[in-house]
Amino acid sequence: MSKFLTGIKSTGRPHIGNVIGVIYPTIFLTKNEIFKNKFILIANLHAITNFKYIKKNKKNAYNILAVCLACGIDYKKFIFYRQSDLPEVTELLWFFSIIFPYNRLKLVHSFKENVRKKNLINTGILTYPILMAADILISKAELVLVGKDQLQHLEIARKIAKKINNIKQIFTLPKAIGIEQLIPGTDGTKMSKTKKNIIDLFASKKEIKKQIMKINTQNKFSNNKKDLLKDNLYQIYIILAGKKNKEKITKKFQMGYQHAKEELYRFIITKFQSERILYKYYIKRKNKLETIFKQGAKKMKKIVNYTIYEVRKAFELIN
Protein backbone atom coordinates (compact mmCIF):
# COMPACT_ATOMS: atom_id res chain seq x y z
CA MET A 1 0.00 0.00 0.00
CA SER A 2 1.39 3.41 -1.02
CA LYS A 3 0.74 7.02 -0.13
CA PHE A 4 -0.02 9.47 -2.95
CA LEU A 5 0.37 13.25 -2.75
CA THR A 6 -0.16 16.20 -5.03
CA GLY A 7 -0.45 19.90 -4.30
CA ILE A 8 -2.00 22.97 -5.89
CA LYS A 9 -0.83 26.48 -5.00
CA SER A 10 -3.68 28.80 -4.02
CA THR A 11 -2.91 31.62 -6.43
CA GLY A 12 -6.33 31.53 -8.09
CA ARG A 13 -9.02 29.29 -9.52
CA PRO A 14 -7.51 26.29 -11.36
CA HIS A 15 -7.33 26.85 -15.12
CA ILE A 16 -7.62 24.30 -17.91
CA GLY A 17 -3.90 23.47 -17.61
CA ASN A 18 -4.35 22.56 -13.92
CA VAL A 19 -7.39 20.43 -14.74
CA ILE A 20 -5.66 18.49 -17.55
CA GLY A 21 -2.21 18.41 -15.94
CA VAL A 22 -3.04 17.78 -12.26
CA ILE A 23 -6.68 17.05 -11.45
CA TYR A 24 -7.52 14.49 -14.16
CA PRO A 25 -4.15 12.67 -13.78
CA THR A 26 -4.80 12.49 -10.02
CA ILE A 27 -8.11 10.72 -10.71
CA PHE A 28 -6.51 8.41 -13.30
CA LEU A 29 -3.44 7.50 -11.23
CA THR A 30 -5.39 6.77 -8.05
CA LYS A 31 -8.40 4.90 -9.44
CA ASN A 32 -7.09 1.51 -8.27
CA GLU A 33 -6.90 0.49 -4.63
CA ILE A 34 -3.11 0.35 -4.12
CA PHE A 35 -3.05 3.60 -2.15
CA LYS A 36 -3.37 3.59 1.62
CA ASN A 37 -3.80 7.38 1.66
CA LYS A 38 -4.38 9.95 -1.07
CA PHE A 39 -3.46 13.51 -0.11
CA ILE A 40 -4.35 16.73 -1.93
CA LEU A 41 -2.54 19.70 -0.47
CA ILE A 42 -3.73 23.28 -0.94
CA ALA A 43 -0.42 25.14 -0.78
CA ASN A 44 -1.66 28.42 0.68
CA LEU A 45 1.63 29.21 2.47
CA HIS A 46 3.56 28.90 -0.79
CA ALA A 47 1.09 31.30 -2.41
CA ILE A 48 1.82 34.18 -0.06
CA THR A 49 5.48 34.45 -1.00
CA ASN A 50 3.83 36.94 -3.36
CA PHE A 51 1.95 39.50 -1.25
CA LYS A 52 -0.74 40.08 -3.87
CA TYR A 53 -2.30 36.68 -3.11
CA ILE A 54 -2.79 37.31 0.62
CA LYS A 55 -6.24 38.94 0.43
CA LYS A 56 -7.73 36.21 -1.78
CA ASN A 57 -5.96 33.25 -0.17
CA LYS A 58 -9.03 31.85 1.61
CA LYS A 59 -11.25 32.32 -1.45
CA ASN A 60 -8.66 30.67 -3.71
CA ALA A 61 -8.50 27.61 -1.44
CA TYR A 62 -12.29 27.21 -1.70
CA ASN A 63 -12.06 27.62 -5.48
CA ILE A 64 -9.48 24.85 -5.78
CA LEU A 65 -11.53 22.44 -3.69
CA ALA A 66 -14.74 23.27 -5.59
CA VAL A 67 -12.99 22.65 -8.93
CA CYS A 68 -11.53 19.33 -7.72
CA LEU A 69 -14.97 18.14 -6.60
CA ALA A 70 -16.60 19.37 -9.83
CA CYS A 71 -14.06 17.42 -11.90
CA GLY A 72 -14.86 14.18 -10.11
CA ILE A 73 -12.47 13.81 -7.16
CA ASP A 74 -14.32 12.09 -4.31
CA TYR A 75 -13.53 13.90 -1.04
CA LYS A 76 -14.48 10.75 0.88
CA LYS A 77 -11.58 8.87 -0.73
CA PHE A 78 -9.02 11.71 -0.55
CA ILE A 79 -7.65 13.84 2.27
CA PHE A 80 -7.93 17.51 1.28
CA TYR A 81 -6.08 19.91 3.57
CA ARG A 82 -4.68 23.42 3.68
CA GLN A 83 -1.00 23.83 4.41
CA SER A 84 -1.74 26.54 7.00
CA ASP A 85 -3.92 24.15 9.04
CA LEU A 86 -0.80 22.15 9.95
CA PRO A 87 1.78 24.24 11.89
CA GLU A 88 3.86 21.05 12.07
CA VAL A 89 4.81 21.66 8.43
CA THR A 90 6.55 24.93 9.24
CA GLU A 91 8.23 23.32 12.26
CA LEU A 92 9.63 20.67 9.94
CA LEU A 93 10.77 23.47 7.62
CA TRP A 94 12.98 24.73 10.45
CA PHE A 95 14.63 21.35 11.02
CA PHE A 96 15.22 20.95 7.29
CA SER A 97 16.61 24.47 6.89
CA ILE A 98 19.27 23.65 9.49
CA ILE A 99 20.68 20.75 7.51
CA PHE A 100 20.34 22.04 3.93
CA PRO A 101 23.09 24.36 2.59
CA TYR A 102 22.10 27.98 1.88
CA ASN A 103 24.25 28.19 -1.27
CA ARG A 104 22.43 25.23 -2.83
CA LEU A 105 19.12 27.09 -2.57
CA LYS A 106 20.54 29.94 -4.66
CA LEU A 107 21.12 27.43 -7.48
CA VAL A 108 17.51 26.22 -7.63
CA HIS A 109 15.81 26.95 -10.99
CA SER A 110 12.79 28.67 -9.44
CA PHE A 111 15.01 31.03 -7.41
CA LYS A 112 17.20 31.88 -10.39
CA GLU A 113 14.08 32.54 -12.47
CA ASN A 114 12.87 35.09 -9.89
CA VAL A 115 16.30 36.74 -9.96
CA ARG A 116 16.29 36.79 -13.77
CA LYS A 117 12.88 38.49 -13.79
CA LYS A 118 14.13 40.96 -11.15
CA ASN A 119 11.25 40.05 -8.85
CA LEU A 120 11.32 41.13 -5.23
CA ILE A 121 13.16 38.30 -3.48
CA ASN A 122 12.01 37.58 0.06
CA THR A 123 13.32 34.82 2.31
CA GLY A 124 10.23 32.72 1.56
CA ILE A 125 11.15 32.54 -2.12
CA LEU A 126 14.64 31.34 -1.21
CA THR A 127 13.37 28.67 1.22
CA TYR A 128 10.42 27.65 -1.01
CA PRO A 129 11.99 24.23 -1.85
CA ILE A 130 12.55 23.50 1.86
CA LEU A 131 8.88 24.16 2.63
CA MET A 132 7.94 21.92 -0.28
CA ALA A 133 10.22 19.20 1.12
CA ALA A 134 8.38 19.52 4.44
CA ASP A 135 5.04 19.21 2.61
CA ILE A 136 6.15 15.99 0.93
CA LEU A 137 8.02 14.30 3.76
CA ILE A 138 5.72 15.08 6.68
CA SER A 139 3.06 12.72 5.28
CA LYS A 140 5.71 10.17 4.25
CA ALA A 141 4.22 10.17 0.76
CA GLU A 142 5.88 7.64 -1.53
CA LEU A 143 4.47 8.85 -4.86
CA VAL A 144 4.21 12.55 -5.65
CA LEU A 145 2.50 13.99 -8.73
CA VAL A 146 4.67 16.89 -9.88
CA GLY A 147 5.30 18.80 -13.08
CA LYS A 148 8.70 18.92 -14.79
CA ASP A 149 9.43 22.30 -13.21
CA GLN A 150 9.02 20.77 -9.73
CA LEU A 151 11.30 17.75 -10.19
CA GLN A 152 14.29 19.61 -8.78
CA HIS A 153 12.29 20.40 -5.63
CA LEU A 154 11.39 16.73 -5.24
CA GLU A 155 15.06 15.82 -5.54
CA ILE A 156 15.85 18.30 -2.74
CA ALA A 157 13.22 16.54 -0.59
CA ARG A 158 14.94 13.22 -1.27
CA LYS A 159 18.35 14.64 -0.31
CA ILE A 160 16.96 16.05 2.93
CA ALA A 161 15.27 12.72 3.73
CA LYS A 162 18.61 10.92 3.27
CA LYS A 163 20.38 13.36 5.62
CA ILE A 164 17.72 12.92 8.30
CA ASN A 165 17.83 9.15 7.84
CA ASN A 166 21.58 9.25 8.55
CA ILE A 167 20.67 10.57 12.00
CA LYS A 168 17.66 8.27 12.46
CA GLN A 169 15.73 6.20 9.92
CA ILE A 170 12.42 8.10 9.56
CA PHE A 171 11.54 8.86 5.95
CA THR A 172 10.87 6.83 2.84
CA LEU A 173 12.33 8.42 -0.29
CA PRO A 174 9.50 9.90 -2.40
CA LYS A 175 9.32 9.23 -6.12
CA ALA A 176 7.86 11.44 -8.84
CA ILE A 177 4.84 10.20 -10.73
CA GLY A 178 2.98 12.00 -13.47
CA ILE A 179 1.45 12.19 -16.89
CA GLU A 180 3.09 14.67 -19.20
CA GLN A 181 0.03 16.39 -20.64
CA LEU A 182 0.79 20.08 -20.50
CA ILE A 183 -1.40 22.64 -22.26
CA PRO A 184 0.46 25.72 -23.48
CA GLY A 185 -0.86 29.12 -22.49
CA THR A 186 -2.61 31.47 -24.91
CA ASP A 187 0.78 33.09 -25.62
CA GLY A 188 2.54 29.79 -26.28
CA THR A 189 4.49 29.64 -23.01
CA LYS A 190 3.55 27.55 -19.95
CA MET A 191 -0.01 28.35 -18.87
CA SER A 192 0.15 30.41 -15.69
CA LYS A 193 -2.22 32.64 -13.75
CA THR A 194 0.60 35.10 -13.12
CA LYS A 195 1.22 35.44 -16.87
CA LYS A 196 -2.52 35.92 -17.54
CA ASN A 197 -2.29 33.47 -20.44
CA ILE A 198 -4.89 31.00 -19.15
CA ILE A 199 -8.20 29.53 -20.24
CA ASP A 200 -10.47 29.51 -17.18
CA LEU A 201 -13.05 26.74 -17.59
CA PHE A 202 -15.13 28.13 -14.75
CA ALA A 203 -15.32 31.75 -15.88
CA SER A 204 -18.32 33.18 -17.73
CA LYS A 205 -18.82 32.07 -21.33
CA LYS A 206 -17.99 35.60 -22.45
CA GLU A 207 -14.67 35.54 -20.58
CA ILE A 208 -13.74 32.07 -21.90
CA LYS A 209 -14.39 33.21 -25.48
CA LYS A 210 -12.28 36.32 -24.90
CA GLN A 211 -9.39 34.19 -23.61
CA ILE A 212 -9.61 31.80 -26.58
CA MET A 213 -9.63 34.67 -29.06
CA LYS A 214 -6.32 35.83 -27.53
CA ILE A 215 -4.53 32.58 -28.45
CA ASN A 216 -1.43 33.30 -30.52
CA THR A 217 -1.35 31.56 -33.90
CA GLN A 218 0.96 31.39 -36.89
CA ASN A 219 0.61 34.22 -39.38
CA LYS A 220 -0.63 31.95 -42.12
CA PHE A 221 -2.34 28.56 -42.10
CA SER A 222 -0.31 25.65 -43.50
CA ASN A 223 -1.40 22.08 -44.21
CA ASN A 224 2.15 20.95 -43.50
CA LYS A 225 2.04 18.64 -40.46
CA LYS A 226 5.24 20.06 -38.97
CA ASP A 227 3.93 23.61 -39.24
CA LEU A 228 0.60 22.61 -37.71
CA LEU A 229 2.25 20.95 -34.72
CA LYS A 230 4.09 24.21 -34.01
CA ASP A 231 0.83 26.17 -33.96
CA ASN A 232 -0.28 27.08 -30.44
CA LEU A 233 -4.02 26.95 -31.14
CA TYR A 234 -3.68 23.58 -32.86
CA GLN A 235 -1.72 22.12 -29.92
CA ILE A 236 -4.36 23.24 -27.41
CA TYR A 237 -7.20 21.87 -29.54
CA ILE A 238 -5.50 18.49 -30.08
CA ILE A 239 -4.72 18.02 -26.38
CA LEU A 240 -8.34 18.70 -25.43
CA ALA A 241 -10.07 16.83 -28.26
CA GLY A 242 -7.61 13.95 -28.60
CA LYS A 243 -5.34 12.82 -31.45
CA LYS A 244 -8.13 10.62 -32.83
CA ASN A 245 -9.88 13.82 -33.97
CA LYS A 246 -6.87 15.23 -35.85
CA GLU A 247 -8.53 15.12 -39.27
CA LYS A 248 -11.70 16.89 -38.08
CA ILE A 249 -9.66 19.55 -36.31
CA THR A 250 -7.41 20.11 -39.35
CA LYS A 251 -10.51 20.75 -41.48
CA LYS A 252 -11.65 23.41 -39.02
CA PHE A 253 -8.27 25.10 -39.39
CA GLN A 254 -8.56 25.03 -43.16
CA MET A 255 -11.57 27.32 -42.77
CA GLY A 256 -9.42 29.89 -40.96
CA TYR A 257 -8.07 30.59 -37.50
CA GLN A 258 -11.12 32.63 -36.49
CA HIS A 259 -13.37 29.68 -37.31
CA ALA A 260 -11.04 27.27 -35.45
CA LYS A 261 -11.11 29.48 -32.35
CA GLU A 262 -14.91 29.63 -32.40
CA GLU A 263 -15.06 25.85 -32.78
CA LEU A 264 -12.64 25.40 -29.87
CA TYR A 265 -14.83 27.66 -27.73
CA ARG A 266 -17.94 25.59 -28.55
CA PHE A 267 -16.02 22.36 -27.91
CA ILE A 268 -14.84 23.53 -24.45
CA ILE A 269 -18.30 24.73 -23.36
CA THR A 270 -19.84 21.42 -24.43
CA LYS A 271 -17.09 19.13 -23.09
CA PHE A 272 -16.94 20.74 -19.67
CA GLN A 273 -20.63 21.55 -19.26
CA SER A 274 -21.20 19.22 -16.28
CA GLU A 275 -18.01 20.41 -14.52
CA ARG A 276 -19.11 24.03 -14.88
CA ILE A 277 -22.54 23.25 -13.40
CA LEU A 278 -21.05 21.30 -10.49
CA TYR A 279 -18.52 24.03 -9.76
CA LYS A 280 -21.33 26.57 -9.36
CA TYR A 281 -23.07 24.14 -7.02
CA TYR A 282 -20.04 23.60 -4.77
CA ILE A 283 -18.70 27.15 -4.66
CA LYS A 284 -22.04 28.34 -3.25
CA ARG A 285 -21.64 25.92 -0.33
CA LYS A 286 -18.67 27.36 1.57
CA ASN A 287 -19.74 25.62 4.80
CA LYS A 288 -19.46 22.23 3.13
CA LEU A 289 -16.04 23.12 1.68
CA GLU A 290 -14.82 24.31 5.09
CA THR A 291 -16.04 21.08 6.68
CA ILE A 292 -14.05 19.04 4.14
CA PHE A 293 -10.91 21.05 4.97
CA LYS A 294 -11.43 20.65 8.72
CA GLN A 295 -11.99 16.90 8.37
CA GLY A 296 -8.82 16.69 6.28
CA ALA A 297 -6.78 18.63 8.85
CA LYS A 298 -8.04 16.34 11.61
CA LYS A 299 -6.97 13.21 9.71
CA MET A 300 -3.61 14.78 8.83
CA LYS A 301 -2.90 15.69 12.48
CA LYS A 302 -2.73 12.01 13.39
CA ILE A 303 -0.19 11.41 10.61
CA VAL A 304 2.02 14.48 11.01
CA ASN A 305 2.15 14.41 14.83
CA TYR A 306 4.03 11.13 14.76
CA THR A 307 6.44 12.37 12.07
CA ILE A 308 7.23 15.48 14.13
CA TYR A 309 7.68 13.33 17.24
CA GLU A 310 10.23 11.18 15.38
CA VAL A 311 12.15 14.21 14.09
CA ARG A 312 12.21 15.92 17.49
CA LYS A 313 13.53 12.72 19.00
CA ALA A 314 16.20 12.44 16.30
CA PHE A 315 17.35 15.99 17.15
CA GLU A 316 17.32 15.02 20.87
CA LEU A 317 14.68 17.59 21.78
CA ILE A 318 12.56 15.06 23.66
CA ASN A 319 13.30 11.87 25.59
Image (tube, grey):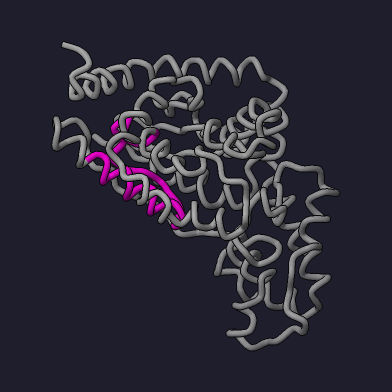
The extreme right residue here reads: 206
Q: Position of residue 123 (x, y in %)?
A: 50, 38
* Magenta stretch bounds: 135-161
Label total for image: 0
Residue 273: name its quadrant. top right
As drawn, 61 above or below 300:
below
Q: Tell me what residue is drawn at x 68 percent, y 54 percent.
A: 195
Q: Tell me what residue is drawn at x 42 percent, y 43 percent.
A: 129
Q: Tell me what residue is drawn at x 18 percent, y 24 percent.
A: 314
Question: Image quadrant for the C terminus?
Answer: top left
In the image: residue 45, left or right of residue 94: right
Verify whether residue 48 appears in magenta: no
Question: Image quadrant for the N terminus?
Answer: top left
Verify whether residue 137 appears in magenta: yes
Q: Position of residue 85 (x, y in %)?
A: 49, 20
As drawn, 204 above or below 64:
below
In the image: residue 38, left or right of residue 217: left
As drawn, 301 above or below 22:
above
Q: Position of residue 94 (x, y in %)?
A: 36, 29
Q: Position of residue 150 (x, y in %)?
A: 43, 51
In the image: residue 103, left or right of residue 41: left
Q: Nearer the viewer, residue 219 or 271?
A: 219
Residue 89: name its quadrant. top left
Q: Tell me what residue is drawn at x 59 percent, y 17 percent.
A: 290
Query: Majority secondary structure of the magenta segment?
Result: helix
The extreme front residue here reads: 103
